[in-house]
């Protein structure tokens, strides 16, 4: 099935569901003109860089940033990992955080999605507020670095988990929605496979599909192409 056809199927189905590591200081650069922007962290050890690619052809629904981070300080116990981190992410843009191993990318992601509470500073997601205080259906999807698929469950069952947790739709509709998302990422023939029976690239695709199950407007990906061959990485970038 084509991507557009699969998306139409997903939309029709949802319409039937009514209930359903070193210290650093970050200095943002101007982005008034669009294009590529870097936030450079002056770290004693590893640098953490942020890259923003804005799709200016998209109509922005609001002038408010989708994500705002203001003077954030994070760490573990008495150890400060980052401080004075500030940036904004506009709607309809691709925002990448780049850095070496151990520079704190995954840790920062944990704070952005609300798994950790900031020591100081503020994280705000438009329409949500502070993510660590939010309760309810997650307003975003997440692809964790390892994929985080449950090894004892099939791909279809892994994808159905968000629906089981946050909706009351029946099993038949769950299965149909899971199949549609698998079709979308090119895994339509593998719904009954276990994660241990597929390749690393396929696991990443399945993780993306699960992140899309609740049709979020915001997606977080933690190193989606790490450990993959160049061809598979390029295919994931295209996806």
Image (cartoon, grey):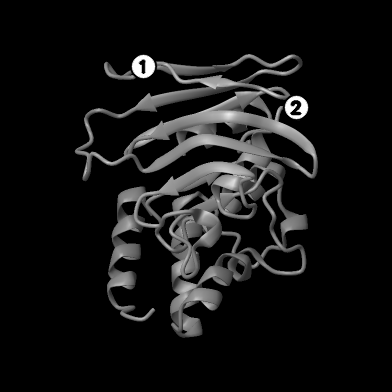
Taking 127 as reference, is 72 left or right? Answer: right
Quarter in which the N terminus is drawn: bottom left
Number of marks in the rendered image: 2
Give residue 75's quadrant in the image.
top right
Label at residue 76: none
Q: Which residue is mark 1?
A: 30
Question: For this view, does 219 lie left or right of residue 144?
Answer: left
Q: In the picture, residue 73 is in which quadrant?
A: top right
Left or right: 209 in relation to 225: left
16 lies above or below 184: below
85 shown above or below 205: above
Residue ranking furthest to the right? 78
Q: Quadrant of residue 24?
A: top right
Image spot of residue 80 (x, y percent): 73, 34
Residue hosting label 2:
101
Q: Residues within 10 Å of mark 2 (few under 14, many from 20)?
A: few
Q: Can see residue 106?
A: yes
């Amino acid at each position: 099935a084509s991507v557009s056809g699969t998306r139409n199927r997903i939309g029709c189905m949802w319409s039937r569901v009514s209930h359903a590591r070193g210290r650093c200081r970050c200095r943002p650069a101007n982005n008034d003109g669009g294009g590529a922007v870097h936030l450079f962290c002056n770290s004693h050890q590893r640098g953490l860089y942020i890259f923003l690619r804005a799709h200016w052809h998209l109509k922005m629904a609001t002038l408010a940033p989708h994500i705002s981070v203001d003077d954030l300080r994070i760490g573990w116990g008495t150890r400060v990992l980052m401080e004075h981190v500030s940036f904004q992410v506009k709607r309809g843009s691709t925002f990448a955080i780049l850095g070496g191993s151990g520079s704190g990318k995954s840790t920062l992601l944990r704070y952005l999605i609300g798994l950790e509470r900031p020591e100081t500073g503020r994280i705000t997601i438009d329409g949500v507020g502070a993510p660590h205080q939010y309760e309810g259906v997650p307003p975003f999807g997440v692809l964790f670095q390892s994929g985080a698929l449950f090894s004892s469950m099939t791909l279809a069952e892994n994808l159905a988990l968000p629906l089981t947790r946050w909706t009351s739709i029946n099993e038949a509709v769950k299965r149909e929605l899971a199949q549609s998302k698998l079709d979308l990422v090119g895994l339509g023939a593998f719904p009954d496979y276990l994660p241990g029976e597929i390749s690393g690239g396929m696991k990443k695709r399945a993780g993306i599909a699960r992140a899309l199950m609740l049709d979020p407007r915001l997606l977080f990906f933690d190193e989606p192409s790490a450990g993959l061959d160049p061809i598979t990485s390029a295919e994931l970038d295209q996806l």
